[in-house]
Image: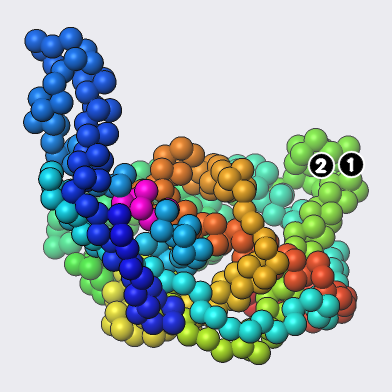
Amino acid sequence: MKYSVEDVSPVQKKVNIQVPAEEVHAALAATTALYRKDVDIKGFRKGKVPSSVVEGRFKKQIYNEATTDLINLHINQILGEMKVSPLSSIDVDAGLLARDQEFKYSFSFEVAPEFELPEYKGITIEEEEVEVNPAEIDLVIERLRQNMAELLVVDEQRSPRDKEVVVIDFQAFDEGKPIQGIKAENFQMTLGEGGALPEFEELVKELTPGSTASRNITMPDDFLNKDLAGKDVLMQVTLHNIKEKKLPEVDDELAQKAGGFDSVDKLKEVIRESYVSSRKQLHKSAAQKKALDELKAKVEFELPPSLVSGRIEQKIAEFRSQMEKKGRDPDSLGRTREELEEQFRPEAEDMIKSQIFLLAVANAEDLTVSEQEINAYIQQQAQSSGQNAEELKKFYHDNNLMFALKDTLLADKAMELIYENSEVKMVPPESPGGHARENNS
């Protein structure tokens, strides 16, 4: 195998590979041998099927696997010799192996730009002190009371009010025909919390238990069903009953039910400790970001285009997903694809610049990420997403994403190193309770 490296730009490299026919033959023979060992074909003993028969039967699979395995082998070998770590996923431009023929292909990737690091050790980092307002603990207690409230059916024959829970049936109609997807039976909702259209809630509030009413309601312009967006539909609602919440007293029994605590004082102590722990981490993260922003401002370098575009794509996908979860159609906002890209570009470029800077620190400090650390991260991601860890790891490998994953972990280590080697100056919080930055984040 021979290869040559082409510098497309300061952050882009292309590797051209030339594989002789002898190596192609060896790759195909090796993959065929693996199939031959386990294949079961009528008329032949297992493991004794001629290679020509195996290749004829499984040609597509064999040639695909042999090509992938050979390319992956070359990529690892070449990157090791070049002593570079791709910042982006590797883009392979290749066909399939052909028996007795030379095989030519190329792969491209992006690398970190070269720049001189400013002094990053011994810097001063300001971090907000953690303060917990007693009123915040009371809010948590109140949420616990709401979650543990007992729902009691109201015997009085009257209309429901805000903060009360109603049990209803509803069905939407368009030109006299029921609309699929806008229907429910024994649906339970709390009034006055903004969970439904105001017109819908007003209709419910006019009912008494056992009664039914209908009204034309205008659907939102950004309604997920584009055929109904901005359109008037007839909404029919039946109110079954009204329930009011009976809140538990703030006493030791509440503390016991909330988590097995001996007293309300112990419950409040645990809530406070949880606040301090989580808020300290938030303040630490905010301090680290501010310090990193100040360090980044001291350097300039070219950003790898595909890293930026990939991060923009990720931000757009997250934006659309959030809109759809709210039942809103992202396309109804009237923004073009180009406008969305420009909206998210500054944030994407800032994130990529942060990553490149931290990777430069990691390289200067000879930081490494072990296989165990990578596996632990994948395991954690799998658990949080409900996926199989081995399948997730295979996805990273098959899509050449292991380099990006390793870089993420290296960047985290570099940021922690900067923080640990800095002079952390604790400062008063920006506002009472110390959560102004959190609310603005």
Q: Main secondary structure of the magenta part?
A: helix
Q: On the image, which quarter does residue 368 sit in? A: bottom right
Instruction: Give me the C-alpha separation between circle 2 and circle 1.
Output: 6 Å
Q: List x then y, in percent, for residue 187.
A: 41, 47
Pointers 2 and 1 in contact (C-beta within 8 Å) = yes
Compared to 373, does 409 lie above or below? below
Q: Secondary structure at mark 2?
A: helix
Question: Left of 63 or right of it: where is 430?
Answer: right
Residue of label 1:
263
* In-image side of 267 versus 414 (left or right): right
Q: Residues within 10 Å of mark 1 (few under 14, many from 20)?
A: some
In the picture, the quarter occupied by the C terminus is bottom right
Please report the residue visible at 46 percent of the width from the left and 37 percent of the height from the top: 390
Q: Where the N terminus falls, by quadrant?
A: bottom left
Q: Residues within 10 Å of mark 2 (few under 14, many from 20)?
A: many
Could you say where residue 208 lies in the image, as x and y percent from the top left?
44, 53
Residue 204 in view here: no
Amino acid type at circle 2 is Ala
The residue positioned 82% from the left and 74% from the top of the image is 422
Colour setup of the view: rainbow
| Residue at 47 percent of width and 60 percent of height | 81
Question: According to the image, label 2 marks what residue?
Answer: 255
Q: Is residue 37 left or right of residue 270?
A: left
Task: Reply above or below: 217 against 405.
Answer: below
Queried whether the magenta region covers residue 72, the answer comes back as yes
Which element type, helix, strand or loop, lies under badge 1?
loop
Q: Nearer the viewer, residue 210 or 6?
A: 6
Q: What stretch of residues is rendered in magenta? A: 71-76
Position of residue 341 relative to residue 377, above or below, is below
Depth check: 344 or 396 in front?
396
